[in-house]
Image (spheres, rainbow, N blue to C red):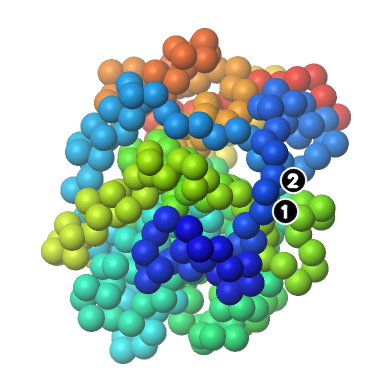
Amino acid sequence: MALEVMTGFSGSYAPEDVTFLLKPIAMAATDVAAKEAAIQSGRRHYSEMIAPETIPDQDYLALYHAALARNGARLAQDVASLAARIAGQRPGGEIVLVSLARAGTPIGVLLARTLRAWGHRASHYSISIIRDRGLDRVALAHIAARHDPRDAVFVDGWTGKGAIAGELRASLAARSHGFAAELAVIADPAGQADFAATDDDYLIASGLLNGIVSGLVSRSVLNDEVVGSGDFHACVTYPHYAHADLSRAFVDAIAPLAAAAAPRPVADHTGRRAALMAGCEDMVQALLARAGTRDRNRIKPGIAEATRALLRRMPERLLVRDPQDADVAHLLHLAVAHRIPVEPLGESSHYRAVAIIRGLGNEA
């Protein structure tokens, strides 16, 4: 993987698929328990550290491939529908996709490939956004110097409870560099995106994995020791996992299906957003009470957010709506492996799964 610090790099994707506007660094991983203690005590922000990443075992990878086979056609249809909605807002012009690293990156690649297959001009960048720290403004300036910010749309895979969507809006409230906080996602159960292909909390296969489905790139890092005033936010790369990389295989499997799909109409779903947002907030408040905490960051709603919590945090419990649902099979696998209790979420929940992070007694 060729790495160019201030001009971007493509990770393990083809160069035309994406330009990561991140600064590759070397950083030792922080043990999960030590990382959790540092975060909850307030001594370190989560973005200052990186948890260890490993290659999943064969049983877990089999669950990934099963999810891809089961839900791949649905994802392709949703990608096509979202691509058509984005293109419809920018007739005849360039489309600048700005995916939010790293969960948004595979979706951005799929959207870019689909739009180009349909004859549109599309550029795709992946940039960092960090809760409580905002968007990478150096990366925004880099894009603004090369494209009209009015042609840009921000892309993510899904919404959990809306923390990143809120961070995007806050970062661009003053229209930094001329960008508007327009967010497009595949699945928006929280009602926080401007438009989405669905509000169903379904399993997007890329959500099961970390770097090996995201260009062999880590979650972004913002640490004064490695990020200077003129630098992009940082990342760690994993070229030593190239033998297990599924990044190109994932987009290669979905992109032709998306290009051939007949798009469904995608509205801005403003009529649904209020109800979705209210439902999400009611659930979060109920789970805060259930967990005996005031820390919203310990509640991780949605299949993908729960997955990330089980892969790189210290959950105290996993809640699932239906343990027979194939879309939560990988979560149950992880719960058994890590000895995490599984509890019912409730049949009426709009979400299929929620993880609650273990409290370490450090709340103010």
75 shown above or below 295: below
78 or 142, which lies in front? 142
Residue where numbered disc 1 is placed: 222
The three-letter amino acid code for the residue at tag 2 is Glu
Q: Report whether 10 appears left or right of 43.
A: left
Residue in the image at 22% along x and 73% along y: 117
The three-letter amino acid code for the residue at tag 1 is Leu
Quarter residue 57 falls in: top left
Residue in the image at 34% along x and 45% along y: 246
Quarter residue 285 falls in: top right
Residue 178 is situated, as x and y percent measured from the top left of the image, at 61, 82
Residue in the image at 82% along x and 24% along y: 362
**Structural crowding at the residue carrying mark 1, measured as other residues with C-alpha within 10 Å and reported as few (<14), some (14–19) or many (≥20):** many
**Structural crowding at the residue carrying mark 2, measured as other residues with C-alpha within 10 Å and reported as few (<14), some (14–19) or many (≥20):** some
Residue 139 is situated, as x and y percent measured from the top left of the image, at 63, 71
Q: CB atoms at circles 1 and 2 under 8 Å apart?
A: yes
**Residue 267 seen in the current view:** no
Residue 114 is situated, as x and y percent measured from the top left of the image, at 26, 67
Circle nearer the N terminus (1, 2): 2
Q: Secondary structure at mark 1?
A: loop
Separation of disc 1 and disc 2 at Cα?
Answer: 5 Å
111 shown above or below 340: below
User: Which numbered dot is residue 173?
Assistant: none
Residue in the image at 67% along x and 65% along y: 232
Residue where numbered disc 2 is placed: 48
194 or 355, which lies in front? 355
Mark count: 2
Q: Report whether 34 appears left or right of 341.
A: right
